[in-house]
Amino acid sequence: MNTEKIRTRASQLWKQEIRPLLIMVLVLCSIRSSLADWNDVPTGSMRPTIIEGDRVWVNKLAYDLKVPFTTWHIVEWAHPKRGDIVVFFSPHDGLRLVKRVVGLPGDTIELRNSVLIINGTPVEYQPIAEELLRDIPAAERAGHVFASEQLPGQTHAVTGNPAAPAKRNFEPHIVPAGEYFMMGDNRDNSFDSRFWGTVDRKQIVGRATAVVMSLDKQRSWKPRWQRFFSSLTRD
């Protein structure tokens, strides 16, 4: 095969196969970057709402539209609400984390003996519905306490482990303008704003709204079918 034939074949290969494939990959990656994505959850910092092995759906259009592959905002139409579960880049090490918004810009956040206090008012805690613990094995509940936290505007489940060393007290902190105070639902096992401070609005990727799929790594990655396509939003 002469040089001209090789060039012709290479040109055809580029135009008919390689270029369309690259365009498709670029489009798909752009969609994941700016419109919607998923996030694997390897730790239990959001138990019992999100558990290890969950893959959560992230709506990147919940608050704004960003330039693909960046955190630059093209336009904003909403802001995170108290109680939203959001995905963001940690100010501590830049990793993507999943936590709950408990403090909005201008709020005064305090933690006293594990009780969250927002703007001087202690949050109320009630017994938790048993159905919210259905995916937590009985053996893993031992030594833990579970409650329903009544955030203003939203109710959600939280976990505590009284025997574990944890940061259960936090002096009053005013959330700066354009920033948010994040906490994990597993209060005694979450590395969050209590340790590394608030999160800038620009570092928030999107809102986690559902569990797309869930695999139990303790049982050879057996699917937890009951968690597939389950909502993370509860009133």
Image: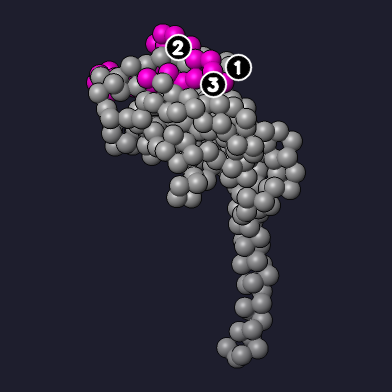
Q: Say what secondary structure mark 1 lies in.
A: loop
Q: Which residue is mark 2?
A: 125
- Given the current orientation, which residue lies at the most extreme bottom position? 2
Q: Which amino acid is tagged 1? A: Gly
The answer to whether residue 135 of the structure is visible from this angle is no
Residue 173 image offset from top left, x and y in percent = 51, 31
> Is 67 above or below relative to 196?
below
The reply to whether discs 2 and 3 touch (Cβ–Cβ < 8 Å) is: no
The tag on residue 64 is none
Q: Which is nearer the N-term, disc 3 or disc 1?
A: 3
For label 3, the residue is 118
In the rendered image, which residue does mark 1 sit on?
Answer: 153
Q: Position of residue 118 (x, y in %)?
A: 54, 21
Could you tell me the amino acid type at mark 3? Answer: Ile
Q: Is there CB contact under 8 Å for labels 3 and 1?
A: no
Q: Residue at x 32, y 30 (%)?
A: 166
Q: Percent x, y for residue 151?
A: 54, 18
Secondary element at image label 2: strand
Ranked by sequence position, the earlier of labels 2 and 3 is: 3
Mark found first going from the N terminus, 1 or 2: 2
Which region is colored magenta?
113-142
- Residue 109 drawn at (x, y percent): 52, 26
Q: Amino acid at mark 2?
A: Tyr
Q: Is residue 67 visible?
A: yes
Residue in view at x 74 percent, y 36 percent: 77
**124 drawn magenta:** yes
**Magenta residue check for 23:** no
